[in-house]
Amino acid sequence: MADPRIPPGRAGRMRLRHSLEVARRGADLLDQKLRILRARHEELLRAEHTARDHWHERLGEAETWLRRGLLIGGEESLDTLPTTRPAEVEIVWTSTMGVRHPQTASCTVPEREADAPAPANTALIHAEAAYAEALRDAADYAVTRAAARAVGAEVLSTRQRVRALQRHWIPRLEQALARVDLALEQSEHEDAVRRRWAARALQDGL
């Protein structure tokens, strides 16, 4: 609440100055946050591209071994492969400037049971191992992709808030403060003129 001893015009100017200071400080803090988020987003994008390349490379190797195994043993050779338990993925989460996102993924691929029959040929054994590695790489890629998307979304949101403050809210406050300053200056000038007239009239009357 404004001090009742301060004229409304001066109180309004004080409120505008305070609002302008808060807006400028908020814009500076958001701009710092934006720089940090952009740097982190670029890191995550590079990590995403690297993880994607690793996954595609490993998947290609697995498919190559699978084709070789099928050429050697025929499609019926897949019937001898045992059904294993599904893989398990554990996600470790973190945050960047308040943005929660996955950090790492630990993918556990169940090993073949000791009494389970081995694949029909060596190529299928290599295919089995390569697919397990491809699955782990896929989990890593999914984590980096999700993290990049989360931080990227916050980059866009923060950029919009900074622009709103810098291009709209702060200029409006500056214009309003300039109008108030001008009005107060004119009012003070008029008061000074009236005081001089009153003093001159008083002297003339004496």
Image (spheres, rainbow, N blue to C red):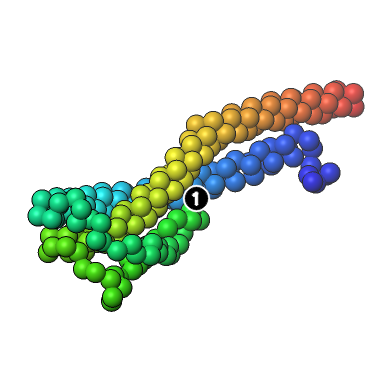
The residue closer to the viewer here, 17 or 205, is 17
| Image-quadrant location for residue 153 | top left
Q: Is 158 left, or right, of 115 in this rendering?
A: right
Report the residue marked by disc 1: 29
Rendered residue at 13%/63% (across/down): 121
**Residue 109, horizontal then vertical, whole percent:** 32, 66
Q: Is 95 left, or right, of 7 in this rendering?
A: left
Residue that sits furthest to the bottom in the current view = 114
Q: Is 181 left, or right, of 57 in this rendering?
A: right
Rendered residue at 79%/37% (across/down): 7
Q: Badge 1: few (under 14), some or many (20 or more) residues near its Cα, within 10 Å?
A: few
Residue that sits furthest to the right in the current view = 206
Rendered residue at 33%/62% (across/down): 83
The residue closer to the viewer here, 89 or 194, is 89
The residue closer to the viewer here, 139 or 128, is 128
Rendered residue at 44%/48% (across/down): 150
**Residue 85, horizontal then vertical, whole percent:** 38, 65
Q: Is 69 left, or right, of 173 in this rendering?
A: left
**Residue 174, horizontal then vertical, whole percent:** 57, 33
Q: Quadrant of the C terminus?
A: top right
**Residue 82, horizontal then vertical, whole percent:** 29, 63
Which element is circle 1 on? Answer: helix
Above or below residue 129? Residue 146 is above
| Three-letter code, disc 1 | Leu
How many numbered discs, if any?
Answer: 1
Would residue 58 be visible to someone looking at this image? no
Would residue 139 be visible to someone looking at this image? yes
